[in-house]
């Protein structure tokens, strides 16, 4: 997984791990026949319960459980995000489902019904196919031997911007819009400046400081937008949001500088040369080298 995909993955997990974001997403876009039967008062995130230590790629992004249809029947909701089109999604989802059931059997629990949810954003058109369609020209007598199950597919490109802007939960609205437009050019992204500014100011008013930090880290890493690129947005946001953004930018620059100096020092370059190259005081470079030596012990 490259750095950009890691950034998408981290952002999705951080936001959809919030109960209010997941619940709001279900209420906004789920099919009515499912949504009306989910018991939201019992909805809870299941953290690190379904893991496969030997196969890290089979760990679902975010997992929730809830009761269904007023009964004790448990439904497990597997939230999985994709920034690219996957050819055989059922194969990965089936491993997730098996992990859930293995864990339930281990704990001597009744097996839950697993609803897999794929949230797709990015280039390429995701066309839903059944699992049986993977087997071309399948003889009718063999169909019963092929497992088959559905998953819910939500392609953000098919949800209009105005619909996302009107989502009741601001965190969900911001998350969905960022994911949808994460592959935009800088010019395209900044066409939505008023949306970004409005939502950031709402988040500030609601004291959602950590979420604001998450948003700016994502903008810088996945969207590769700099402080200078984001100037049109900064002119419309509160002073507090500006300070948070500046702090994130400074921390990122410090980290990049640290890594660059570490690389040069490990190649045998002297502190004086590094200080001259970075136009930094020699004392500061020596402090960083001392930190590198301490952390590497």
Image: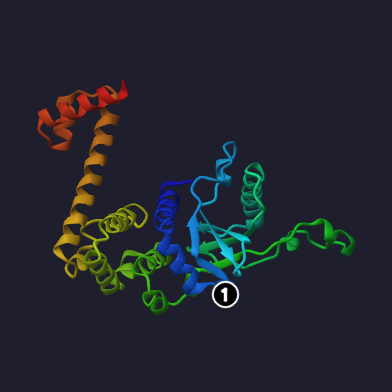
- x 19%, y 67%: residue: 237
Question: Which residue is depicted at the point 50% across and 73% down?
Answer: 29
> Do we see residue 183 in this rendering?
no
Residue 179 lies left or right of residue 271; in this view the side is: right
Residue at the limit of the structure toward the right, as seen here: 141
For label 1, the residue is: 31
Between 189 and 200, the residue placed more toward the observer is 200
Number of labels in the image equals 1
Q: Quadrant of residue 105?
A: top right
At 12% across and 35% down in the image, what residue appears? 280
Residue 51, position as x, y percentages in the image: 56, 43
Name the quadrant of the C terminus.
top left
Is 205 rendered above or below residue 86? below
Residue 38: x and y, percent?
A: 55, 68
Tag 1 secondary structure: loop
* One can see residue 23 in this view: yes
Q: Is residue 59 above or below residue 204?
A: above
In the picture, measured across the screen, residue 48 lies left or right of residue 21, that is: right
Residue nearest the observer in this picture, 223 or 116: 116
| Left or right of residue 181, residue 26 in this image | right
């Amino acid at each position: 997984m490259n750095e950009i995909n890691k950034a998408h993955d981290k952002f999705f997990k951080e936001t959809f791990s919030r109960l209010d974001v997941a619940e709001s997403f279900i209420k906004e876009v789920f099919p009515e026949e499912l949504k009306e039967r989910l018991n939201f008062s019992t909805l809870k995130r299941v953290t690190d319960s379904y893991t496969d230590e030997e196969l890290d790629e089979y760990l679902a992004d975010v997992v929730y459980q809830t009761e269904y249809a007023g009964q004790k029947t448990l439904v497990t909701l597997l939230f999985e995000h994709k920034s690219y089109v996957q050819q055989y999604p059922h194969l990965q989802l089936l491993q997730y489902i098996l992990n859930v059931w293995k864990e339930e059997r281990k704990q001597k629990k009744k097996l839950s019904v697993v609803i897999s949810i794929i949230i797709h954003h990015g280039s390429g058109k995701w066309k839903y196919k059944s699992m049986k369609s993977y087997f071309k020209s399948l003889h009718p007598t063999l169909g019963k031997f092929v497992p088959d199950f559905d998953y819910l597919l939500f392609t953000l490109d098919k949800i209009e911007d105005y619909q996302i802007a009107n989502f009741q939960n601001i965190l969900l609205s911001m998350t969905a819009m960022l994911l949808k437009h994460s592959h935009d050019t800088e010019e395209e992204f900044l066409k939505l400046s008023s949306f970004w500014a409005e939502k950031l100011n709402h988040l500030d008013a609601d004291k959602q400081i950590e979420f604001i930090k998450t948003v700016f880290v994502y903008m810088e890493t996945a969207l590769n937008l700099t402080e200078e690129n984001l100037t049109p947005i900064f002119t419309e946001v509160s002073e507090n949001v500006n300070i948070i953004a500046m702090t994130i930018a400074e921390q990122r620059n410090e980290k990049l500088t640290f890594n660059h100096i570490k690389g040069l020092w490990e190649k045998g370059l002297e502190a004086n040369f590094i200080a001259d190259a970075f136009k930094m005081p020699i004392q500061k470079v020596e402090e960083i080298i001392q930190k590198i030596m301490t952390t590497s012990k």
